[in-house]
Image (cartoon, grey):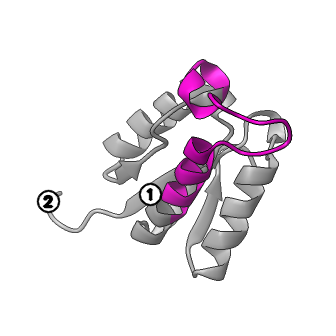
Amino acid sequence: MVGNYPVVTLCGSTRFKDEFMEAQKRLTLEGNIVISVGLFGHSGDREVWENMDEGTLTKTKEMLDDMHKRKIDMADSIYVINVGGYIGDSTRSEIEYAKSHGKEVRYLES
């Protein structure tokens, strides 16, 4: 197969780094262009949280959240990494954003 590959953006809690990597591999082998997160804040990438004030997001976290919405804009669909059914606030926001922009939403776990 050469040519028109669907584009999928991965969404989910960054605590599920291993599951992100497995989904990226599987979806790529299925013929998709996969867009993922750039940092795994809940799996050790401290840069996401540095300079965080009490109760506020860091500028880095705000930027990463906005960038992820732009990644959703570039995709045909999103694939939600919802291990154990877990969907946090950020992921819920991304799902709502994707739906409101006509993107297909698929889930690791139904």
Task: Tell me: 36 left or right of 108.
Answer: left
Q: Amino acid at mark 1?
A: Val
Tell me if residue 2 is in the magenta stretch.
no
Q: Residue at x 55, y 43 (%)?
A: 60
Could you tell me residue 72's position as x and y percent? 50, 64
Magenta stretch? 42-69
Could you tell me residue 3's position as x and y percent? 16, 65
- In the rendered image, which residue does mark 2 sit on? 2
Q: Amino acid at mark 2?
A: Val
Could you tell me residue 36's position as x and y percent? 45, 44
- In the rendered image, which residue does mark 1 sit on? 8
Could you tell me residue 30's position as x and y percent? 36, 47
Q: Residue at x 35, y 53 (%)?
A: 32
Classify 105 as above or below 44.
Answer: below
**Front residue of this view, candidates 51 and 8:** 51
Q: Nearer the viewer, mark 2 or mark 1?
A: 1
